Structures are given as structure tokens and as C-alpha cells.
Amino acid sequence: MSRAAPPAPPGAEAAEANVGPAWELRGWRLSLHHPLVMGILNVTPDSFSDGGRLPSPEAALRRARELAEAGADLLDVGGESTRPGAAEVSQAEELRRVLPVVRLLTSKLGLPVSVDTRKAAVARAALNEGAAAVNDVSGLDDPEMAQAIASAGAGAVLMHMRGTPATMRSLARYRDVGEEVAAELGGALGRARIAGIPEAAIILDPGLGFAKTADHNLHLLRDLRPLLALGRPILLGPSRKAFLGELLDGAPPGERDVATAAACALGYAAGARLFRVHDVRAARDALRVAHAVCGGGRA
Ligand code: HH2
């Protein structure tokens, strides 16, 4: 008796059509034929789940090695918490936190490093220290950011949010969250293209938790088709976020890694290809299962 092939998961076809073979970032080529995991390295005193854990560049390097060992494909270094209500960090302070860590990681680790920043000056300095990509949660809000990325030949993650971390909560109002996030992210994509950032360098992110309610996050995880229609691979950052805590009867951030892995697997089935997480091993394992179930074979 022969079995019918399982139906393709929603988004899978669109994902295959537009991911292209690889994400190209400053000489690195990360294949998108299997899920990619971005390990989070927050060098902040106040990040919502891991603030204050990495007091020195050496501690950051030790943590980076653990993330690499667990299977991270790249590492994302951030010097500013963007949790809801977070205060802005000065450029000088962000540079002081981020640069020594980027310098150490790019010289000691054989993995690409991205810098999580909204400031073009911080991006430029990190790129000078060897960072391969910029992860901009503001979607190129700083008028000099697109040029900073383009002239370095760096990769770009363009995330959707509204307002700033201080104001975004009140801006979580949508008629159709998927269509509106895609339309607004399309503006950032246009700015990237005009600045000359190559297509193969650009990744899009709906910004889970950024000007989104829990229901908006669930809707986006369920249906990424409007974003996939923009024609670029999708990154998701569900890691330890409050909407998972709500689903787990108020579990604290440190107890949300299994839920994060589940969200990654479902996001993969919906068409996302990159995942920004704290617990790399858990996400990696869940994504290997998702990849095999979706017909991609063994990752
Ligand atoms: N989420 C956070 C930070 N950067 N970047 C992208 N591309 N996508 C995300 O969803 C995303 C991101 C917030 O999480 P975290 O870094 O854990 O916390 P904090 O902002 O408090 O440092």
C-alpha cells in the first residue's frame, strides 16, 4: 500500500521559492537549505532574561564558545536592551559594551558575528572590528544605517517595530497584523535596496513582541505568507518572550526555553528560516525535527 505524501505545511512553498541558496554576509555564505540558529549574546546589565550575566569580554567569549558548541550558526552581540519600556542607552555606552566583545569574538571564533544595534555609528564601529552583519530592530530608522551596511558589504536583518521600546506597547493596533507588518517592513526593504545592500544580504523579521500583543505574535507565527511575499528569508526571535510566559501560566524567562523551541519549530513550518535564541541546543534539536518533518531530510 502506498501512502500519499503529507500536505506541505503552510508557507513552505513560498519559503522555498524565495529563500535562495544562502545568506551572504561579508564573505560568509550561510546555506538556507536548512534552518539557521543565531545565538544571543547580550552584553547589557538589564536585558529581560539574561542581563548582567557577561560582565567582561572574556566572559562573553566563554559564553560564545558554549553557543558555538551547542550548534549556533552565528552570534548576535547586543549592547542595548530593547524590552518594552527600556530606556535608551547612549552611543558611548553602547560602544563601550559592544566593541571589545565583537573584537574578541571575530578574532577568536570561527563564526560570523552580527551586532544588534539601532545606531549607525555603533554598526560602523562593529563592522570595522570584523562584524559580518547588522541586526537592526528599528528597520533602518537611523538615516545613515543603510549606507553603513551597504558600504561594508555586510548582511542586514531588518526587523519590524513601531515607535521605540519606550512607546511601542501603545502602538500594537492592527486591522490585519500580517499585512500591515509586511507593508511597513516593505518600506525598510526599499530603503535597503536604494542604499545598494544586495538582495542576498537581506533578511526580514516581523519583530515578535515589538509593538505586538500575544495574539499578534501567535498570528504571525501561524501565518507568515504576507511577509514571505516580500521575497526575502524570514528570521524569528521568539526566545523567552512574554507571550510564551503567558501561555505557560506566568513561567519566568528562564523557564521558557522548551516553549521557545516549539515556537521555532512551528515558525519553520510556517516558512521562517533563521531563529534568534538564547538556548541554542534546544532550538537546534527542535528545528532538526521540523526540517525532517517538512521534507528537508536530516539537517
Ligand atoms: N528581540 C530582541 C532583541 N533583538 N532582534 C531581532 N532581529 N529579532 C528579535 O525578535 C529581537 C532582536 C529582544 O530580546 P533580547 O535580546 O533577549 O532582550 P533585550 O532586548 O532585553 O536585550
Image (cartoon, grey):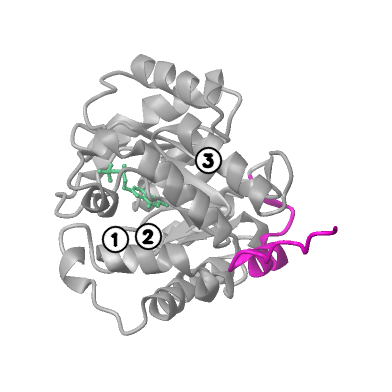
Counting every numbered tag in the picture gives: 3
- Residue receiving disc 2: 207
Q: Residue at x 72, y 59 (%)?
A: 20
Real-space Cα separation, disc 1 to disc 3, in angstroms: 24 Å
Q: Is mark 1 within 8 Å of ligand 1?
A: yes
- Is 132 on the left-hand or right-hand side of 167? right
Query: Does the residue at mark 2 contact the one at mark 1 (Cβ under 8 Å)?
Result: yes
Res. 240 in view? yes
- Number of the front mark, 3 or 2: 3
Q: Give the range drawn in magenta.
A: 1-25
Foreground pick, 149 / 266: 266
**Nearest-to-viewer mark from 1 and 3:** 3
Q: Mark 3 points at which residue?
A: 286
Task: Point out the image quarter for the C terminus.
Answer: top right
| Nearest to N terminus: mark 3 or mark 2 | 2
In the rendered view, does 51 fall on the left or right side of 111?
A: left
Pointers 3 and 2 in contact (C-beta within 8 Å): no
**Which label sits on residue 293?**
none
Going from the N terminus, do you reach mark 1 or mark 3 first? 1
The image quadrant where one finds the N terminus is: bottom right
Q: Residues within 10 Å of mark 1 (few under 14, many from 20)?
A: many
Q: Which residue is drawn at 58% across and 29% down?
A: 111
What's the residue at 67%, 60% (across, down)? 19
Q: Position of residue 160 (x, y in %)?
A: 38, 65
SS under mark 1: loop
Q: Distance between the residues labelled 3 and 2?
A: 21 Å
Crowding at label 3, few (<14), some or many (≥20) Cα neighbours within 10 Å? some
Q: In this view, does 241 lie to the left or right of 206?
A: left
Where is 266 relative to 68, above or below?
below
